Amino acid sequence: MALAVIPKDRITAVLREKDILEATRQALIAQAEGHVKAPPPGQLMFEAANGDCHIKYGAIQGADTFAIKVATGFYDNPGQGLPVTCGLILVMDARTGRPLLLLDDEGWLTNMRTAAAGALAAHAAAPAQISALGIIGAGEQAYLQARWTARLMGIENIHVWARRPEQAGALSQQLSQEGFQAKASPNTADLLQSCNLVITCTPAKAPLFPASEVRPGSHIVAMGADSPGKQELDPTLFARADTVLCDSLDQCLDHGDFGHAVRAGHVPETKATELGHILSRQTAGRTAPDQITIADLTGLAAQDIAMADLVRARLPDQ
Amino acid sequence: MALAVIPKDRITAVLREKDILEATRQALIAQAEGHVKAPPPGQLMFEAANGDCHIKYGAIQGADTFAIKVATGFYDNPGQGLPVTCGLILVMDARTGRPLLLLDDEGWLTNMRTAAAGALAAHAAAPAQISALGIIGAGEQAYLQARWTARLMGIENIHVWARRPEQAGALSQQLSQEGFQAKASPNTADLLQSCNLVITCTPAKAPLFPASEVRPGSHIVAMGADSPGKQELDPTLFARADTVLCDSLDQCLDHGDFGHAVRAGHVPETKATELGHILSRQTAGRTAPDQITIADLTGLAAQDIAMADLVRARLPDQ
């Protein structure tokens, strides 16, 4: 029997944001509670093309299926009129090893589950009063983080900073058109002064701002460091932080921002907690208003599996 | 644009054995010469279903494409009327990160490139006169190894041993019907007495025969140990061997039979040479008739990439 390929439009037609959020929340909890068998992600770097490929795969304990997700980020693609990211998810039968379904989502599911995790991580340790949401980066994921987080948390004010001011301007304009109070910040110091909830979503390979720019009472969510060599946060910020949340301790130690801080000796490995433990309400993400908190997200196979399961549940003929 | 899926029948229709052999030879040479970027394979084990999944992926230096191969072995599948192995190869654009082609070959390409590597490894260090070809195992790969090796080397006599005698009988009968002089051996001692070229192709997790059964002048090719935990050869055989060939030193040390011998302290890592160096004629695989030689094969992403390239070359509209 030929492998069934589900094109992107059928996938986007059946998934709703609230289902994606809930599935992502459950995936992060399953990860923290040890119910996911997911080896370290595969990584391939394409230096000449300024691209990378991640392969995330794994199984939820006892499930009938498992999933293999391929995601690419080729950062010069916009110059050719192509999106930066792409990807697909292969769903396999865990009882026979046979492929069941190919979700040819062009990276959409990865983008959505990443946005959902960012919003959940933002919510998990945010201060009670948000002065404004700060977004660092101006790509597709920056847009999604702004939108998902602002909607989940009822935030109106969004400040955007990006290395290229024209892109920050374009994103803040887009968000304004969607009804948010959005503006571009002139620099990171201004953004971190105005915003006590900040999400970084860039492919940066060096810290985006000095730790000294972060005010007490801020929550910083770092989304970008999903491969060895990437880095968004000043590693000394982890020493200042009261709480560090990781989507996966193993992954964040291997290639997240937290790993940079641990290897540099600023903090011990034991400083971080897995985000899923906060989401299942076993632990508080923030215990005082003036704490600095960090969430470091690398992206989990568990999230990809959750998206595949969600698509299958919503396409009952599969 | 929807991802193009090439079904198995279109793939089998265009590939010829001699092309597969030559592409495999070049892949093994490229591996040995360091032209392949292939991270360690991904592995997932499904203990309850007696199955495993390998994800092999990588890129040839400077190539326009890269490949991700998924292969499964679920050893109880025949009880449900399904083949043990399955798999597919995803071909990606190395300049944009976008998927180009899905080869839905149901594991056929993996089986073929594995058979080709076995035949090449058998030939690379075989004694000048083959008394008979010994095959240990009676599954699909055992059949392919027998056929490909006997054809490549012009061997008529084949002896088969398997844990289940009825399966060894069935395989020897099948090979006889194809014109070989095939018989089932009553035990491994008999097979190793009669055959000075022996290929093991089983999912064994413990040595199949004691090293003492191996006569001087024998070449043993071990195909089966492609995951941590699998093992076919008595590790002390590596101490007796004059030459050890590995398809990939890294992989064989990690999960091949050679790795078991090194970890047990029987031989140093430096004892092995990569098979590709023999195939490119930089080194001799055997230098005296009474030597014991071993080839340990784990299966390379380079071989999968080579198969994908071959299919694309033979399907010029892709």
Image: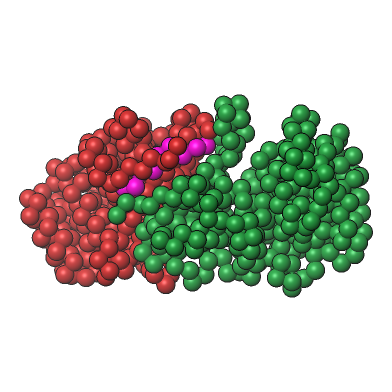
Chain colours: A green, B red
Q: Is residue A146 above or below residue B264?
A: above
Going 24% across and 38% down the picture, which residue do you hit?
B15
Q: Is residue B32 above or below residue A242?
A: above
Check if residue A256 falls in the magenta segment.
no
- Left/right of residue B158 with respect to residue A296 in the rendered view: left
Q: Quadrant of the C terminus of chain B?
A: top left
Q: Residue furthest top?
A: A79
Tell me where residue B287 appears, x and y as whole percent.
29, 40
Going 50% across and 58% down the picture, which residue do you hit?
A311
The picture quadrant where one finds residue A268 is bottom right
Q: Nearer the viewer, residue B80 or A139?
A: A139
Residue B150 visible? The answer is: yes
Magenta region: B97-105
Tell me where residue B81 appears, x and y as whole percent.
25, 66
Q: Nearer the viewer, residue B204 or A61?
A: A61
Q: Nearer the viewer, residue A81 or A177?
A: A177
Tell me where residue B137 appears, x and y as whole percent.
25, 61
Q: Is residue B316 above or below residue A242?
A: above
Tell me where residue B229 appears, x and y as whole percent.
43, 64
Going 27% across and 70% down the picture, which residue do you hit?
B79
Q: How many marks?
A: 0
Residue B259 visible? The answer is: no
Q: Nearer the viewer, residue A266 or B283?
A: A266
